[in-house]
Amino acid sequence: MASEKTMTRTIRLRVNGKEHSLDVPSRRLLVDCLRYDLGLTGTKEGCSVGVCGACTVLMDGQPISSCLALAVFADGKEIVTVEGIAREGKLDRVQQSFIDHGGFQCGSCTPGMVVTARALLDANPNPSQDEIKEWMLGNLCRCTGYYQIIESIQGAAGEASDA
Amino acid sequence: MHNFEYREPDTLEEVLALLGELGEEAKIVAGGTALVIMLNQRLLVPSHLISLRKLRDIDQIESSDGTLQLGALATLRAVETSPLVKEQSPVLAETYAQVATLRIRNMATVGGSLAHADPNQDPPVTLMALDARVGLASANGSREVALDEFFIDYYETVVRPDELVTRVMVPRAAPHTGSAYLKFLPRTSEDYATVGVAARVSLEPDSGVCQDCRLVLGGVGATPLRARDAEDLLKGQKSTPELLEAVAAAARQLTDPVGDSRGSAQYKRAMTGVFVGRAIDQAWERALA
Amino acid sequence: MTYTVVGKPLGQVEGPAKVTGAATFTADVILPEMIWGKVLRSPLPHARIVSIDTKAAEQMPGVLAVLTARDLPDTLTGRVVYDTPVLARDQVRFIGEKVAVVAAEDPDVAEDALALIEVEYQELPAVFDAEEAMKPDAPLLHPDYRSYPHAPEKFFSELPNVHSHVTWQVGDIEEGFAQAQQVFEYTFTTHSQHQGFIEPHASVVSVDSEGRAHLWISNKMPVRAQKLLADAVELPQEQVVVHPVCIGGDFGGKGSLMDAPLCYHLSKRTGRPVKMVMTYTEELMAGNPRHPATISLRTGVTDQGKVVAFQARVVFDSGAYAGFKPVPIVNIPGANSAAGVYGTPHVKIDAYSVYTNCVPSGHVRAPGDPQVTFAVESSMELIAEAMGIDPLEFRKRNLVQDGDLLPDGHRLEHVRIRQTLEAAIESSNWGKPKAHPHVGRGVAASYRHIGAGEANAEIRLESDGTVKVITPVPDTGTGAHTVLQQVVAETWPLPVEQVQVEARPELFETDSGAGASRVTYVVGQLVKEMTEELRASVCRVAATALECQAEEVVFEDGHCTVKGSSDRTLTLAQVAEAGSGKPELSIRKTQVNRDNPQVTTFTAQVVELEVDPETGQIKILEVVTSHDVGTIINPIGHRGQIDGGLVQGIGFGMIEEVVMEEGQVSTLHLGDYKLPNIKDIPPLKTVLVQEEIGPAPFQSKAIGESSITPIAAAIANAVYDAVGVRFYNLPITAEKVYRALRERDSNGE
Amino acid sequence: MNFSQTCSISAGRQKVWDFLMDMENVSQCLPGVESMEKLEEDLYQGVYKIKVGPIALKFQGTLKFEVRDEQQWHAEMRAEAKDRRLGGGVRALLEVDLTEQGPDQTEMRVSLESHVLGKVGEFGQPVMRKKTDAILQEFARQVSERLAGE
């Protein structure tokens, strides 16, 4: 079962606009690669089974669970994490709206929420409440009861990303 | 996760050659949503992963001669949002849209979800009701299998260790046909179905009787179950509450559910009856439209 | 009163860090040379450990240490009673108990090594039900529990496995029943609920060259954690340094050490910093979920519908250890609210906390309250119906009033349950025609104390002119730091930006931390007083510099100015410079509020729902939640507490359950243990019955543990109204409703 | 997890008893037994394979006759085994009771109490339950077929 040597592969990926080339064990999860190989600890690991959404990142623009992806899956891909949402020190509208509307409390679901909400507004700048719920269905929050998250997204709707 | 070797061939031929060479020691990975969890939980300890992620051209969604062709690597999200699928088989788009969450649908693939053969999934139920066929390839050639002969047992299919699911073919429905997939989620709105039922009803336009139908049950057996006895009761008949009750009873008879946190075996069996009736009603209504 | 900063919807001070991913939680701490620990857990509910063979694991490349109980000091740990071994010694008492730990360069390697550890067990008879565990022939889990450190002697019991038996009384229960013409008895049961925080427990320990243990931990009482770790690993308290981190959701569950002692021992052994992060599977099999309870009620009522006697016997399943309970009684204090919002003159409540071979239970938001409120608020309806009285009218006849004594010994002031209840009813569709058959409405009410405890703070004028509050209370997400910022800014007055709040637990020696709905009250009140004191010192320093009397100094836009002469002004930075080195510009205080205030908070909720009689599925159409509130310091945070608690309460009432069969949890990930999601939330009307009366700063009150409590009972009562079936246990799932309907139909016809 | 199966066998009680008391026969009737060797009187060691979809379990361990009570027509066997690849294990107690229904007809009741430990026990319980039930059913079927065929 436990092999003597860990098998590794070299992957090249773009994370938040920056190119990386690194050797990773083939068993390394993308969430661990981002957090520990690249130091991007904004992405959180909650449930480890793709349910809670805390580890959501964008892969080629689409939200995915980085706890269900091996790091090697990201070879040749463009990844955006929560650290890549604000540009040049300026918060994105979604981020500011989450602050203004109480879209988080403890903050552990927030990186996944922000990334998923940004992707929603990029795809659909004026989502209805039902569309927000459908899109955000896979992002669990235990603190807010979601009402203020819906309002945060509504508050950021209407315009494209500031970036 | 245990140690394994990750291979990522560029062509289908190389994948098939590797499969032929490694057989059961290897697992195929596409979207990874099911496999990575099982690896992470150390329920699976393969020596090799053969990734399909570098393959091109088997993620297409096309139509030829009225048959919808879903490439094995098409994501569930791609099927859900495909204008072609929505036009030719709205029920299929509706079904894929009900799988898990957006993230999972962005990752999981058509072929992977069939090969995984979890009896609690949604798409196989509808696909079976639509008379879908599965294309398989190996280094020694290719074959097609009707989906209702595809599943064998929990997480087991007729796919041989050297074979790969390459596509799914969904024939165009006859005129005056309506289909529905109902997913019963009594707990939260994101879950595996306690029961999933797909119904397809084709009507004779003049008499309004059921000419042909399919009734498939998900989550209540080792595989999706095609309720042939129930279908037979419906054929040649008009829908009445009494008939639907008999059809539901025949469908219930077929089930052999596993009790879990989504409901006891008895409850799942009872709910099969309820949702068979509702699915037929909805399919019937759509057939009339 | 009108305020300038209090009452403003300010975003959390931690906001920018949290929305950009910059906020540091324990699992985000990365130290040079850091390694990972993973634990091996018992697969058996009760067994003697015959032997453990770790040789193969130790020899695995990349493994740096493998420890079992034999390698550790023979200590026990816990939040109050120390009854929990760091690693099982000789005996395991639940499935999931820690038996061995491995440290490795990489968490995967540590897991590889776990599989190589061989443990031989000898199975012992086990008991999985608290009532069974109290019977004379039950297997004893802790024969020596009376000798455990901090075991509360006052609450010892002769009953097997009962580690704490607490009685609360008002009046004379015998006398009460003597006055009653009718007596009603009902028994209710509730289940285990996980806190459901998104951040699983994590710990990091780095032992430095002087032997000090640096600790990062997801713990809402870091100063307490310092003491607990010191005791657990036999270090002087000052040798433990707790570093501040954000806490990814607490809900009562994050007050223990979890893996921190193991991190310490591994770090000490290897000379490397060690991180341990629980997986969610570990959370569900060995976290500290809500206590399952059996609640037996006996209620004496007069023919006029007046409740004169109320007796409750509450049995809590503590699981294999009691160490997760943070209160000195080592029991569940919420049991003392079993008599509900009623002013019953004769009350006796007995709460038993019982060891079983199940997952150890802990505190979850409003510990005990949702359990007993489900019981009492269901029983009030049952009694009303039996007596032919409208349930709402029956409640109103018995509501608690000013001057009434609660079972916990509080004589209440400013009681506003009637207004709170009436507001809930008026804002709902109560009494109106129903849109469909199988629609039902239910009401339930509860109260929640405002918590006491010890507060510590430091407040000082910084050289840049900001006023800084330093608190040992970490940010658990409730917005406590923002509230403190607003309290200081309002009190002074200063622009909010000029006030900073920082958590520095390592600067304090004792503190109660966050929890028990206490922070705004005890910390807020202390900080308000200290603000006034610091302001007076600043005035004196400014007066000297401005050559005026201290009383003449006023604050405008963050400057201090001589009253009436706007040209004589200093920035606070200038004052700081002028007062540089003066001790009075930096104040540090401790304040202990031993008792909960006499003013309490009330909640009333009305649920309207529809039942699908074919499937039993419940759809909530509307929830009205009505709260008795004082001044609201931060409306965003205040509302967040109500919304979040409510949805957590709905989860408790109809969705969530840690399912256990013979001690084995079968809901072992969040795909099986379902939390409510964004589509599951009902339309919500929040009613705030506001009056500026409250013990916390600016006449404010607590809100964090209110909305979670009555909702399960309100759902149960609404289901009864909809389809006529009564539930005596939770959660009320579709399947249970379906079965109850079938059963009724087959009996009735 | 507890399971039980009752079946009627077209053979006399003594014949059924003798058949079941031979571990060779038992292992042949139990689907999944890959090997079984005798260590000492009433103690065997063996390998047992079971597949739950993609998850292949290979249990290695012992099987012990704990009770052979011919007076009561009651026997008990205890199995303890481990899967080294997945780090799981199984503990099971199999009880057999025979009731005479006629000179050539016997009712056999087999009941099984089993605990699957480790990962598979944690995550695969519902399906394992189903599988175990199927195995017990198959065991009863095999026994009655073998005896009826003789």
Image: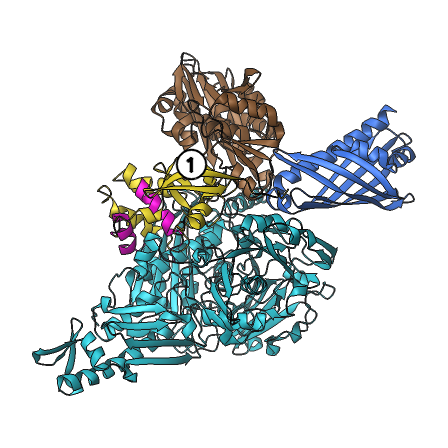
Chain colours: A yellow, B brown, C cyan, D blue
User: Which image quarter is the C terminus of chain C in?
Assistant: top right
Relative image position of residue C321 (x, y in whole percent): 61, 64
Asked whether A102 falls inside the magenta stretch, the response is yes
User: Which image quarter is the N terminus of chain C in?
Assistant: bottom left
Relative image position of residue C546 (x, y in whole percent): 13, 83
D37 is higher (above) or lower (below) than C622: above
- Where on the picture, by quarter, is residue C646? bottom left
Q: Main secondary structure of the magenta part?
A: helix
Q: How many marks?
A: 1
Q: Is C449 situated left or right of B46 in this image?
A: left
Relative image position of residue C591 (x, y in whole percent): 39, 80
Relative image position of residue A149 (x, y in whole percent): 33, 50
Residue linked to disc 1:
A75
In the image, the segment drawn in magenta is A90-119
C685 is higher (above) or lower (below) than C519: above
C284 is higher (above) or lower (below) than A65: below
- Would you call the spot at circle 1 few (<14 residues within 10 Å), some (14-19), or many (20 or more)? some
**Badge 1 amino acid:** Asp
Q: Is C701 situated left or right of C112 in this image?
A: left
**Residue at position x 54%, y 25% from top?**
B247
Whether residue C728 appears in this view of the structure is no
Q: Between A72 and C737, which is closer to the camera in this rendering? A: A72
Give the chain letter at badge 1: A
Q: Secondary structure at mark 1?
A: loop
Q: Between B287 and C1, which is closer to the camera in this rendering? A: C1
Whether residue C273 appears in this view of the structure is yes
Asked whether C100 falls inside the magenta stretch, the response is no
Q: Is C539 situated left or right of C417 in this image?
A: left
- Where on the picture, by quarter, is residue C532? bottom left
